[in-house]
Amino acid sequence: MGRPEFSLFYYPTNTVYVDDNRDFIDGLTLKSMYRDYRAYTQPKVCLDFLEEQYRVTRQDADETIEQTDRRHIFNTLSKLSRFSEPAILIADYSMPGMNGLDLCSQISNPNIKKILLTGVANERQAINALNTDIIDFYIDKSDQDLTKRLDMIISNLKKRYFLDQFPWSNQEARKRIPYVFDCEFADYFEQTCEDLDIKEHYFATDPNSFIMVDRQGNISQMLVFSENELDLLCHNLVRQGFPKKCIDLLNERDFYPNIHDEYGALREGNSQTWDERTYPIVAIECEQTYFCVTLENINKVSSSYKEFIATPSSSFH
């Protein structure tokens, strides 16, 4: 059974560098396309930071609330600190006091992706570490295209960071949201994110949808329905007393009425504002047909990615 084509959650995260040669880190980060990073010259200080971050994350986690709960998502969106979350560690192998492999093996957070920078003399140790899952990748420090290759690896590992935290088993996900396994839907979703300059997205339930946030903090929502789910929605709107024009609009599968609040949830009762704005319905032909509706600019977060990158901070610690 294949993995999902994309993660249910994604937001910009931090890359952590550790090398006792500060000039080397400066050279890497200056050329890298990823400018959100922290850097250390002492591996023990780096380890202490990662362990403290993991402790705080576990302490703040509320296991009684699902990741897909809208309250949880909007609570997350209120915190600028989400962009400081360390997702990737890039560690030099040869450092005094604690080498890169020792550092990687002592990290408690199982989700952090680890890249080891090696030389010819320690390639065998790196291969053994890769085979035993101590690291996720290694690359020769003297590689002529080091920065370019690192950027490609970072891009892939950032996606894996969130995919590996998928909240359901593949079997359960295929029952609940089978479209995330379909490349046609994934292409449409990624194109929509590109068109709207989306920097983070979060899957939400009731109804099933993706909360999407752009660089400026504007929130949009992509609703996804099967044929049966749209029929059920029409039935529920009839029971709530929505006018026939509203129901007909949905039944024709061309436009979607304004029946959601600023948090993306369905409004209770007969909404008098359903016709203030309508949204086009896009049919995506996958193994079955899915109907997508994108509600643009329904809300705005108090802490945006634009605000985060504009906040002065020291990258070296």
Image (cartoon, rainbow, N blue to C red):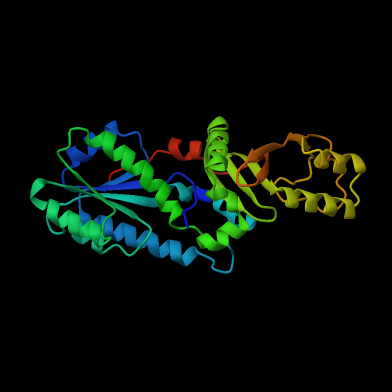
**Can you say whether 12 is above or below 101 in the image?**
above
**Can you say whether 145 is above or below 91 in the image?**
above
Query: Could you tell me residue 129's position as x and y percent?
Result: 21, 59
Residue 55 occupies quadrant: bottom left
Left or right of 134? Residue 291 is: right
**Can you say whether 42 is above or below 60 in the image?**
above
Residue 66 occupies quadrant: bottom right
**Number of marks in the image?**
0
Query: Could you tell me residue 279's position as x and y percent?
Result: 74, 35
| Residue sitting farthest toward the front | 287
| Residue sitting farthest toward the left | 121
Task: Name the residue located 44 percent from the left edge and 37 percent from the top edge.
Answer: 309
Query: Could you tell me residue 15's position as x and y percent?
Result: 34, 46
Left or right of 171? Residue 297 is: right
Task: Name the residue located 51 percent from the left edge and 63 percent from the top edge.
Answer: 169
Task: Name the residue located 26 percent from the left edge and 60 percent from the top edge.
Answer: 134
Residue 190 visible somewhere in the drawing: yes
Residue 296 visible somewhere in the drawing: no
Query: Could you tell me residue 79's position as x and y percent?
Result: 52, 50
| Residue sitting farthest toward the bottom | 64
Task: Name the residue located 49 percent from the left edge and 36 percent from the top edge.
Answer: 306
Q: Nearer the viewer, residue 5 or 205?
A: 5
Left or right of 84? Residue 196 is: right
